[in-house]
Image (tube, grey):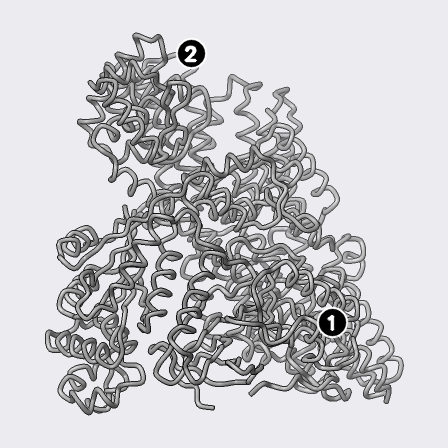
Amino acid sequence: MDVTTFLGAHRYAWLQELGRSPACSWHLLRRESDGTRFLAQIWSPRPADREMDHIRDTYLSRFLDASPLDPLNSHLGFDEEQAWYLQAIQGTPLSRLWAGWGDPQREALLEHLGTLTAQDPHPRLLHPEAITFRPGLTQIPRVIGAAPWETAAVPGFLPQTAPVPALSEDLPWKLPRDLSEPHSRPLRGRSQELPYLKSLMLGLSAPIPMERIVLLQGEEGVGKEHLAAWACAVAEGEGIWVHHLAASDQEPPGRFLGRMVDALLSGNEVDFYAERPEAAKALSLRVQAFSFLTGGRHVHGQDAGPAPEEVRAALEALDFAGLQQRRLIHLSGLDRATPGVLALIREMVERSSLPWLLSLTTGAQGAGLKPFIAQLLSEAAAAVVGVNRLEDRDLRMVLGDFLGPQELPEAFQADLISQSLGNPGLLRNLLELAQQSGALSWGKDHWILAPGQRVALKAEDDLMRQIFLGRLQRLTPASAALVRLLALGERPLPALPLQRLLGLQDDALEDAILGAVASQLVESQQGQSLMPEPRWRELVLAHTPQPELKRLARALSAAFREQGWDCPIPMQSLASDEATALASVLASLLEGPAGSLQETLRTVNQALQLKPSPLQEAHLREHLADAWAAGAREPGEISTLSPSEEALASLGLALKALSKAPQEADLHLKEARLFRKRALLLLHLRRPSEAQEALQAAAERLTGHPHHAEQARLRLALGRLHLLQGHLTKGIRALEEGLHPQAGFKPQPQDQAALLLTLGQALGGQSQFLRAAGLLQSAQRMLEHSQSFRSLVPVQIALAEVRLTQGQPETCAILLREALQTARMQGDTLLQAKGHLALGTVRSLQQWLGPALSHLDRALSRTEQSGDAAQRSVIQIWRARTYAAMGDTVAADHAQFQALAAQPPVMSPEEQGDSLFLQGEVARFRSTWRDTIRLYRSAADVYESSGLLWRQRLALLLYSQAVAREARQSRREAPEQGWAILENLKGPVEGSGSRWLDLEWHRAHALLLSTVPATEAVVQETLEAWGQVQAAARDMLFPAQVMEASAESAQLLLARGEKLGARSRIQDAFPSFQQLWSRLPATHETSFLGREDMHHFRQTVEAVGLKFIQPERADPLVDWTPTQMDLPAFPDPE
């Protein structure tokens, strides 16, 4: 059977026939462009017209009664000989899962299928190649007509293999579903849009369509894509081939033109060249099929704009394609298109005769998009379909479609509906974030709210901004003025003040309120109107001209005074006199901590224009410095100064203002506080000499105040200075003085927690893990009690690092996930960067390389906003280590170069040593042992110079391992230096309480033993050492070390003739290999297997008589057990 091109744009390869009935047959196909598998139901010969009408109606009905069982993407088509119905198959097919399941899972599967088919009214194809699973989702494609067989026939299609014990008893359909993953759901609340859109699509079949250009307009997330899929399905039912092209960021017009022509001429290039050779030659630089006409040159991906003759040739290609088969071009993502692409599209739409469907986002800010839309709307053949927001009752049904079974409180559901503003995309966004935060969790078989979890519904800012701008632009002038008044007022306003302020009578005011309420930017409750969402208020003020704001603020402040209400600061700063506004701003700053950086910048800059006194100016500048120190720049914002440098500059201006202030009793205390803050910023910027001068200035001003709270903060800053300079003992002494002062002052709880954190980190570096953990736990309890969540994150991260060194990786991971979740709840980009960095380093050490790289990349993107060069360098060197572990030496070199380029001019000994140590790790993964030895030795020397005992011992143990490996490589005994290190560290390692050091000591012992002659006693001692390594590696969740110990032990046992024992050791290591493999990016499989230790493991597997088979990467649900290693591979359907 020859099934080649369906629906014009794609070519399909036939894989397998799944079944046949008298009317049709079912086939498994693969789309050649991207490898996606499809189920094709084919009627050959083509059914009669009446039956085709039934097929078409049944196909369209699936959009209205869709269920999660249905595949997400489907297509219908026909020609003179046959008709076809295509459904994309996603997930892991049952045929792959069956062999790895035991009896309980197989029985549960058949029961599950029986339950689904009994509850579902639609006929479906129950074949193991078509039934697929993803976490929480089972998909069974529909059939048009009668089902060819019942559920009872399914076992007959499955391989009759004996069940095997599975590693996991988890059933994929009982796992929680990722709410960010789209699935099939019905169209809801579109009774107005669907008939009009259907009539427009049916009208395209006319010889000369009245409406050839259809613009589908709606705000982001409102459901344009769903409606566009419906419109394309209607067109497909009429025999029209649909070509979907999505615009992309920074795509040049020439490349877009090439993509469009490529799609429309697919399969017809030879005919086009035969009929229109000049046009084909003009397109030869854009279309790969015609590149032979210019000697193979092809600029499809370059930036050169299309020449006029290329545009004319492309128009000829569109007309030619339309003559071969009726076409519809569907364009989406135009808000991301460049002005050049928009101009090209406008010309193609105007000059071609083909029909076009354009999905447009209202309120989008793409360059050139507004004039593009305006010019298209002026076309006589253009029709606009506005996609409205959903009513609350429809949105409730959409909520049910998204979640499925749930037992959420009614109040939470009502809050979801209210916050979603009638927008299904916003609703999905809120659910995703609730799931990510842990507030929304999966119970036994339904969604619930996590007990004791704080629920904060907040959507992504970009989506919110696009929705807002679209709605604000559509408001009438009266409704827009009402919205601006409510944004300034920040409180509910009754009808009477609004009537006076807007100058509207009863009916006109009611119309303005109804318009604002209909946009869901405003709520009306008990005769009062309010804007409930602070984000809306900020956006309204940002998009209102300043003169208009001042006029409204003056009028509104007068109304507030009449009612006896307090005026909000933004309104007062816009409307009142300078002294009153300044006093109000300063009072608000004293009441609480700094808000967002942007809000603080706006408030302080406004207050500085009100002519403050020197003391007032100093207070404002200090508040701004605090905001800069805790904040980050907006993504894409460009500046020559980092936020810390901005904070330092602001503190400098504050000190300058204080120098002009009249002398007061507490003026020197204010100066001491500013100098201490300046010192901390200078330490962060790695400028210790200037920081020391600032601390001396602060200490001089505190001379007569031994009991002041600044004394403890001064000791904290002094301790950090000593630690940066490498004076660990001095730093610990200063921190202990801050905690247990001799002068009688008592640190405040927040200061005490900061002292405990820094002291705990310092003691951990000295290998005093029990004391360090105790101090950090005290700080954790203190901050949890005071609900200082922002300060809690670094404490959780530091405690997690101690727990990892002690051999408690599960506790470490829990602490780090809690820290990252806390940072997300705070909305703090810098804290999130630290959380991702900590998780990325742990996952890199465990060699869970995919998650590690993901966390490190997220940390890097967030750190870029802060301008923290030191942290950026740390992230890059960990990325280099992770890439090296993947076997990607080019990416590792690049990341290592970026790390060294980003290093600050002054580094603490800990940072210097860590950089050298991680460079040694990169060299170790490359098996360049001389470089590894040199770098580990250098790192150990740096650590030793500052008393960082734990790191020094770890570096020395890895140094001795590298010495042993180089000796093994050159087939000689390891030098005495390696044995001396091992003997010297035996006692300190045993007394350290560090399971990690214990692992590395035994590993060094085993490697050193492997370099001496293999007597029976040596072999036995080596086996015992590798056994200790394996046990410690399992405790640490270091699967690569488990594999190494198993492979080395197996080789020793093979040499003794114990093949069964060697095979047992290797089989024990298979789950560890699966752990590594399942978390490895698919793009790095080959390079990862090329690592020396992985190659050694593979050789050992084959040496003991087992077959090395890579686990399935199709889906993480596929179990891969040791017993499967000896089973034949499931036959490929090809």
Which element is circle 2 on?
loop
Relative image position of residue 869 (x, y in whole percent): 42, 52
Numbered disc total: 2
Q: Does 156 sit above or below residue 509? A: below
Eye-nearest disc, 2 or 1:
1
708 relative to 1008, above or below: above
Mark 2 vs mark 1: which is more N-terminal? 1
Residue 220 placement (x, y as % from top left)? 35, 49
Q: Nearer the viewer, residue 855 or 672?
A: 855
> Pointers 2 and 1 in contact (CB under 8 A)?
no
Q: Nearer the viewer, residue 111 or 602?
A: 111
Residue at (60, 51) in percent of width and height: 946
Q: CA distance from mark 2 to mark 1?
A: 80 Å
Mark 1 belongs to which amino acid?
Answer: Trp
**In the rendered image, which quarter contains the C terminus?**
bottom right
Image disc number at residue 1084: none
Q: Quadrant of residue 276?
A: bottom left
Q: Would you say 1043 lies left or right of 885 here?
A: right
**Relative to 89, does residue 991 appear above or below in the rendering?**
above
Residue 214 at x, y = what percent? 24, 58
- 129 or 897: nearer the eye? 129
Q: Which mark is residue 101?
A: 1
Residue bearing mark 2: 665
Q: Quadrant of residue 96?
A: bottom right
Seen from the viewer's position, the closer of residues 139 and 979 is 139
Q: Which residue is farthest right?
A: 1017
Q: Amino acid at mark 2?
A: Ala
Q: Quick check: can you spot residue 908? A: yes
